[in-house]
Structures are given as C-alpha cells and as structure tokens.
Image: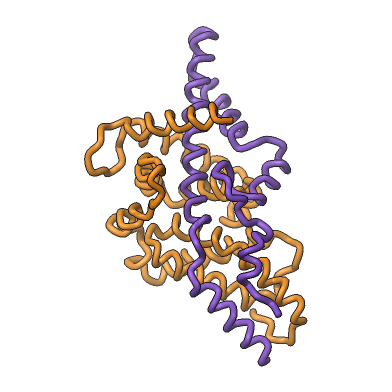
Chain colours: A purple, B orange
Amino acid sequence: MFDVFDILRSGGYGWPDGTRRGAGRLSDQNDSMKGRSPPERDAGDMIEHQSEQHSAGPEVNAAALDEARLRQQAIGVRLRQMFDEVVNEPVPDEFLDILRRADKSAENG
Amino acid sequence: MVDRSPRDPALDNAFKAEIVTLIPHLRAFARTLCGDATAADDLAQDAMMKAWDARASFQMGTNMKAWTFMILRNQFYSEKRRSWRQSQLDQEAAERTLVAVDDPEAPVALDELRLSLGMLPPEQREALILVGAGGFAYEEAAEICGVAVGTVKSRVSRARRALQAILEAGAYDRDGGAAGDAMRSILADAERLSTAR
C-alpha cells in the first residue's frame, strides 16, 4: 500500500538533508554538473564584474574583490537559508490529502 | 491536453512518490512568487494537481523538479493575468509572512533580505531564487522561465547587484534599524559560518 507519509519520513529523493548549508541533494547534483559550487560561481561573476570597473593598483583591486566576493557569498548563504526555511517547514496535511483523493480517484477509473 | 487513458498503478505510485518529495520546494518557490504564505500554498496545491493531471505527459527519470516548477510558475502568471489585484505582491501580506521565523537564532537580516527581494523586478527575483536558492542550473532556470540562458544569466547578475545595493543602502522598507544593519548582520553570520567549518 502506497503511503505518502512513508516517503516523507524516509526523506526521499530531493529531500533536504537537515543541514543549513545548501538546498538539498538536487542542488548538489546541479552544482557538480557545472563543476563549481555556488559560492565559486558568485565569486567568478563578481570578478568578471569588478574587473570592468576598477583601474586602481592590484592591491586595491584585490581588496575590493575580496570584499565584493564576501558580500555576494554572504547574500547567497542567506538566500538559500531563507528558501530552506520554507522547505524545512512541515508539509500541511492538505497537500497529502489532495494527493490521496487523486490517487483514489485514479484507482476508481 | 490531459491523457485520460488507463495508467499503470506502479507508474502512478512512482510519480506520486517523487512529487511528494518536491512539495516543500514547490511551497518555497511559491512563497517567493506570492509573498503571502496562504496564497502560496494555494498556488503550490494547484500546481501539484495540474502536474498530477498531466502525469501521462511526464517521462519518469527526467527532471520532475524543473517540470513542476515550470507548471507552478505558469499557473502563477496565468492567475496574475486573470486577476492582477489578487496576485500582485502586497506589502502588507509580505510583512505578515515575515513573522514566520520561529527559530530564536534565526538572523534578523532574513527579514531585510525578504523585503529587499520584494523590491526587485519579478523576473530578476525569480531568476535569482531559482539559481541562487532553488539549486537549478542556468539552463534549467531558462527552461522554467521560457527564456534564453543568456537572459537568465543577465537577470541573475543584475538581481545580485541590485540586492546588494539595496541591502547596503538600507533602502528596503523597515520598522526602524539603521541603514546597513542588515548587511553587517549578514557579513557577521557569514564569518561565523566560515569559522565553524
């Protein structure tokens, strides 16, 4: 007998792993596909962006890049945290009730 | 068009098993689009049912997360077109949503981040959420939004810069709190995270 609660309890495919450091396994898969973690991508984008704007000495550029990188990474962390906060909320029963009704309806043809 | 032909129960069960794991992600994405938690859950439920009704057209083993996010997004904009007054981001509703943080250690800056996100153009906000929080590749986000990959990259880039500028200037609507508090709090938290590794 299929039970959606079993899936929820087992923490199936794509379910968050309980840590606060990422958006779950799907995120990890996608990141590995691209070969770079999200902070690295952020940093890369900022380097590209900043290098167009700064013409001061290399030390000033490096410091500005570090600062920009840190800020973008920090915002990225918070963004994922904000999203994961909702992901980690218990799923309201309504969702599962709707699926159960749909399942019964399908069984009855 | 919905296929009403008889389905293999095992396929239906597999489909349902997978979609159940995606409900939390659909709720989170809907929350970022709607702002209001109740409206977001209604949207996520509608999207889930649309996905269920269209399950015959989904090929198991392909990316169900991207597929369901696309359904949810289309549903959101379809409803918005029908009744823009209901689905337009309502600042009051957004503020009600902000009190949902029960964790006493949850950083205050998340509220500012939500408010700042609400100030971004919708197309930039959804691109940033999909790539920056939803875990999608640029290519997947482009498919979900129905635009070119370069457009998504550009939207994400502009959203990042705009968000940082809003946070640094303290330009979001807030109840007290000096400008720059949110950014300082975010940086302090990021430092704690990096030293904890």
Residue B11 falls left or right of residue A53: right
Residue B132 falls left or right of residue B54: left
Quadrant hosting residue A101 = bottom right
What percent of the width, then of the height, locates residue B168? 36, 31
Q: Is residue B98 visible?
A: yes
Q: At 34% across and 68% down in the image, what residue appears? A: B86
Which of the pair A70/B196 is nearer the observer?
Answer: B196
Q: At 58% across and 33% down in the image, what residue appears? A: A39
Residue B13, placed above or below residue B191: below
What percent of the width, then of the height, locates residue B129? 51, 48
> Which corner quadrant holds the N terminus of chain B?
bottom right
Residue B143, placed above or below residue A44: below
What percent of the width, then of the height, locates residue B23? 56, 64
Quadrant hosting residue B106 = top left
Residue A109 falls left or right of residue A18: right
Residue B10 falls left or right of residue B171: right
Residue A56, placed above or below residue B43: above
Q: Residue furthest bottom?
A: A108
> Which corner quadrant holds the C terminus of chain B?
top right
